[in-house]
Image (tube, grey):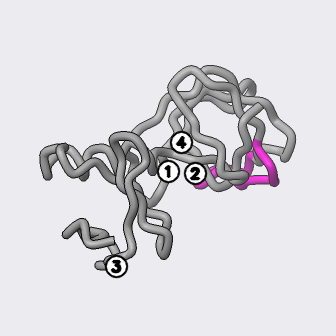
Amino acid sequence: MDNGLKCPQCNSEHVYQDGSLWICPECAHEWNPQAAPGDAGSEAAQEQGVRDANGNALADGDSVTVIKDLKVKGSSLVVKGGTKVKNIRLVDGADGHNISCKIDGIGAMNLKSEFVKKA
């Protein structure tokens, strides 16, 4: 396989073509050599995205379920496990809080995606 390409992640020479993509069997990385170098970073950011506790991708407007009891900071309130939250918004929050939502009986708050699962 002397194609002259190497894997951009692990630098392996054992890569092969599958359609328009090249695939590395050692690290399972896929890439398009014709794509501009700036596109690869944005593509990786989109693939990573915000994921719930089970690894499912989340999007604006999704409904999620809280998987464990969460204390509300600065209050004696608790968001119980099993609470369903509708119409979430994904945000770039501080301290890993990447979901903005409204919870009945509590109000507007931010959640970490690691404590919710997609409903």
Measure how far apart labels 3 and 1 are at the Cα level: 37 Å
Q: Which mark is residue 12?
A: 3
Q: Residue furthest front?
A: 1
The percent position of residue 41, horizontal first and vertical second, equals 24, 52
Measure how far apart labels 2 and 3 are at the Cα level: 36 Å
Of tags 2 and 4, the one toward the viewer is 2
Q: Secondary structure at mark 1?
A: strand
Q: Are marks 1 and 2 in contact (CB under 8 Å)?
A: yes
Q: Amino acid at mark 4?
A: Asn
> Which residue lies under the disc numbered 1?
97
Residue 10: quadrant of the picture:
bottom left
Q: Are marks 4 and 1 in contact (CB under 8 Å)?
A: yes
Q: Is residue 67 inside the magenta stretch?
A: yes
Measure how far apart labels 2 and 4 are at the Cα level: 7 Å
> Which residue lies under the disc numbered 4?
110
Q: Secondary structure at mark 4?
A: strand
Q: Amino acid at mark 3?
A: Ser
